[in-house]
Image: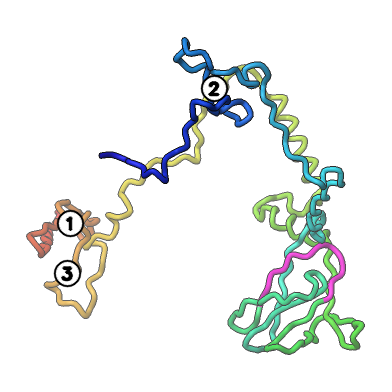
Amino acid sequence: MGNHATSGERRDRNKPGDSFPPYSPGRVDGQAFTFDKHKGQKGLQQQPSEEDHEPVVIKPIQSEKENEDPVPARPRPALAQCNKKMLPFVIKWVGGGQTVAIAGTFNDWQPIPMVKSEKDFVAIVDLPEGEHQYKFLVDGEWKLNWNESAVNNDVGSQNNTITINESDFEEFENALLRDPNDNNKDKPLGSQSQNKEKVEVDKKDEFSQEIPEYQQSEKIRGPPVLPPHLLQVILNKDTPISCEPTLLPEPNHVMLNHMYALSIRDGMMVLSTSHRFRKKCVTTLIYRPIE
């Protein structure tokens, strides 16, 4: 029963004549336990290891390339014209075509698709201040706009040229900031800026710890006498000629269950009211003469 080994598979045992004690694992084999030779001690003793006396310090593995210079970091690509102020410029092409693109010295001659309008192609390009050359790519063929200024290039052909000045955009921005209702529109911009600075200084002098009194402005208006959605009532509308006199247009839901009176004309006062019954609306008109 159980695991029974044959005579050939039996382990070799020590004979009585052997002078050597049985083999036991020791520190050579890296074992933590050893057997005592005394018969009186039946337990096992644990040998102290080096870990109990000295802390273990793990050092990183040094590579062969440790003494070599570190690999320099890859420099970031410098963006051209990153410190220059970009100004928007509108470029048009009126020469026709199916697909039109624009390219120039401002983007290393990389085609930029243009947006097709009704009669022309338009593109808004951000350009720095200075002179730039450009050309149009119409249906795969480079073309020139003869309505604009042109210069000769190194290839022997011509390119359109344009000069961007920041002062032109400043005048345009000042024109947009002007108030058309301002009485000082004929004065130069310098005097207007000085006046604004004086007003700001005066406002700073008026600041104090006293809370100003609230004064209601005259521009504030109250609510309307009649809500705007009640202006389109049946009494204020003319009956179309195509409609039958007995059939009125469908009233708005806000008009239901209200009494309306028309202004008195020719000694006659007109009253009306509208009610809804299921899917039908009934409007009743009352005419009353006034003596």
Q: Position of residue 167 (x, y in %)?
A: 83, 59
Identity of the amino acid at label 1? Met
- Residue at (76%, 87%) from the top-left corner? 142
The reply to whether discs 2 and 3 touch (Cβ–Cβ < 8 Å) is no
Nearer to me, 90 or 219: 90
- Residue at the (66%, 19%) spot, across then down: 208
Q: Is residue 124 left or right of residue 47?
A: right
Alpha carbon separation for disc pair 1 and 3: 20 Å
> Where, by quadrant of the figure, is residue 242 drawn?
bottom left
**What's the CA distance linking mark 1 and mark 2?**
125 Å
Question: Which residue type does callout 2 highlight?
Answer: Thr
Which amino acid type corresponds to the residue marked 3 in the rendered image? Leu
The percent position of residue 117, horizontal first and vertical second, equals: 60, 79
Whether residue 80 is situated above or below residue 240 in the rendered picture: above
Tell me the number on the disc at residue 269.
1
Label 1 environment density (alpha carbons within 10 Å; few <14, some 14–19, many ≥20): some
- State the image coordinates of residue 190 (x, y, percent, origin top left): 82, 47
Location of the C terminus by quadrant is bottom left
Q: What residue did someone put label 2 on?
A: 34
Image: magenta residue range: 122-133
Which numbered disc flags the more N-terminal residue, 1 or 3?
3
